[in-house]
Image: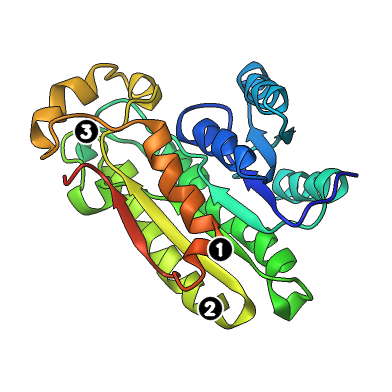
Amino acid sequence: MHSTDRVLLVTGGGRGIGAATARLAASQGWSVAVNFVGNSLAADEVVRTIRADGGHAITVQADVSDEGQVRRMFEKVDAKLGRLSGLVNNAGVVDVSARVDEMDAARIRRMFDINVLGSFLCAGEAVRRMSTRHGGGGGAIVNVSSAASRLGSPGQYVDYAASKGAIDAFTIGLAKEVAAEGVRVNAVRPGLIETDIHASGGLPDRVNQLKVQVPMQRGGTAEEVAQAIVWLLSDAASYTTMSLLDVSGGR
């Protein structure tokens, strides 16, 4: 077992913001568990890069919407890395662009199962390890929300925006719940970020099309979002909890 004072689990860590966060955290001394559900090659590549740079990382497979898989994932992190002190709830999905009157229950259920239920399940496991109420030594949780929670994404992803609105409320409530137990809980709300999540929603050129709406006149990078996440995880943010940090270029 590898033991460190700083053990981090990043859900959906094989690509985009999750991968950038895993790499940056590892460069700052965290031992990182990179979660994936299906794309093992991408997760393996993130771990390979971290190890090549002298860091420590493992992959952990789990569907975050499945309670049993989440429990086993955390148990593997316990066994391989030691006591958890950081969690990034990054795993999430979008769907093809659609109006609400074109959506069916299966689509909406999948969106909330992964984006919301998954974050609840992972945070619950993390709190049971970090909270002083459970014998832990404290820690930090960062939820990846979205500027869509403020904007609503009409005509495209209202279901996604609603799921991220739930993450905002979840962040506020959980932060207050565990603030006296040594656990800080914050969220970042990325705006238009250059990742492949847009292609998975059928709009691969979405950032380029919408960047004129951004005061900074460009899309952001996964690495820029990762900087905010890793700061919120760090001791430099020791008096920061219940914050919703926009990383959106002013949009």
Q: Residue at x 34, y 60 (%)?
A: 244
Mark 3 vs mark 1, CA separation in Å: 38 Å
The residue pinned by badge 3 equals 156
Q: Which amino acid does label 1 sit on?
A: Asp
Mark 2 vs mark 1, CA separation in Å: 20 Å
Percent of width and height locating residue 103: 30, 35
Query: Tag on residue 235?
Result: 1
Percent of width and height locating residue 91: 52, 40
Left or right for 20, reference 68 = left
Confirm or deny contact between disc 2 and disc 3 (CB under 8 A): no
Can you tell which quarter of the image residue 41 is in? top right
Confirm or deny contact between disc 2 and disc 1 (CB under 8 A): no
**Count of numbered circles in the view:** 3
The local crowd at label 3, few if under 14, some if 14 to 19, many if 20 or more residues have their Cα within 10 Å, is some
Secondary element at tag 3? loop
Instruction: Choose between 174 and 97: the one closer to the eye.
Output: 174
Q: What residue type is labelled 2?
A: Glu
Q: Quadrant of the C terminus?
A: top left
Q: What residue type is labelled 3?
A: Gln
Can you tell which quarter of the image residue 120 is in? bottom right
Q: Which of marks 3 and 1 is in front?
A: 1
Instruction: Choose between 109 and 169: the one closer to the eye.
Output: 169
Query: Tag on residue 177?
Result: 2
Instruction: Choose between 160 and 172: the one closer to the eye.
Output: 172
